Image: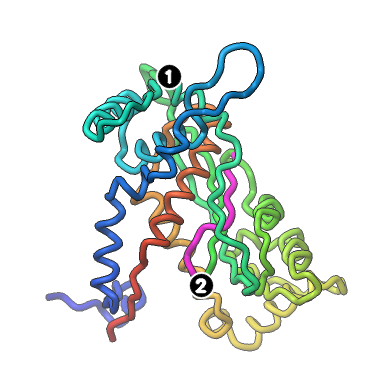
Amino acid sequence: MRYPKRSQYKYAKSRYRIRNWPEYEASLRRRGDLTVWLSDAALHAWRAPASGQPGGQRIYSDKAIEAALTIRMIFHLPLRQTEGFLRSLADLLELELPIPDHTTLSRRLKELGDINFHRLATDRPIHLLIDSTGLRIHVGHLRKPPKRRVWRKLHLAVDGDTGEVLAEDLTNRHTADCVRVPKLLDQINGPLASVAADGAYDAGAVYEAARKKGDGHRVRVLIPPIQGAQPSSSRSPGQWERNRNIRSVRKLGRKEWLANSGYSRRSLVENAVFRYKAILGQRMRSRSLGSQRAEVRLACKILNTMTSLGMPDSVKVE
């Protein structure tokens, strides 16, 4: 075995041990359980209620479309295979359920509206972690793919204590990370204790948006300032947090500040991004922006469901 050189210690992969392996192993098995993704509540609400208006009536409720698309994303099925899977499942369960075809699933995806993936409201202050990543999108049946593949930027806000996704946003690739922070914070109902993000979010609008979510209490904003940043003479409460970070970095050094300020907790949002791409894929299935946004919200709901089933409790092995 070749050990790393002393100058390479920080690049060596750390070893971790899972302390709750039996519970976590059971949660991994439950992720493939169909009863989790196609519950009795979804089957009872499968048919759409009568609208009371003249004309053709909907056959499938939004919950039925959401359940079908959830199974599609979990098991990585195309729309036609999803239709066949649900038909065979209804036959095995001896249920007289109308199964939506693949064209209905594609059309109704963009009409799902607000897919609720938020947790229940709590009085506990939230330690919010924010990051963004890129997702490739379908370019159609082009004979020659474009040199610069088109992609979307996914913005995620994660609870630092539970690992749940609390807010999301999908934009084009040219949107700056700091611009979408106010919209992410508007999706969160609970009080904030702190906000942590990387240096791309070092902007006055981010500090000001975090201050407004404090409800009169000061929100700690942990964003490493850029090299050579100078304290501002502005007396706004949001700018005060940035000046505090700059002075702390000068006093302690950047490496010491990252270790002592609690900024290292931000790695949990990077873990959430990794889980998103590992479980649901790095490529989006929909083509229009409206359908892509509905797909992202549905993916966040899937991630939160898996988080509620159980997460590993790991400790670093020295």
Residue 62 horizontal side relative to residue 209, left or right: left
**Callout 1, which amino acid?**
Thr
Magenta extent: 161-171
Secondary element under disc 2, as helix, strand or loop, is loop
The prevailing secondary structure element of the residues shown in magenta is strand
Q: Quadrant of residue 308?
A: bottom left
Q: Nearer the viewer, residue 118 or 312?
A: 118
The answer to whether the residues at label 1 and label 2 have Cβ atoms under 8 Å apart is: no
Residue 281 horizontal side relative to residue 195, left or right: left
Q: Position of residue 158 (x, y in %)?
A: 53, 62
Q: Position of residue 21 (x, y in %)?
A: 25, 73
Q: Nearer the viewer, residue 35 or 244?
A: 35
Picture layout, residue 282 above or below residue 68? below
Q: Quadrant of residue 310?
A: bottom left
On residue 161, the disc is 2
The residue where tag 1 is placed is: 103
Give the mark nearest the N terminus, 1 or 2.
Answer: 1
Q: Position of residue 248 (x, y in %)?
A: 66, 84
Picture layout, residue 173 above or below residue 224? above
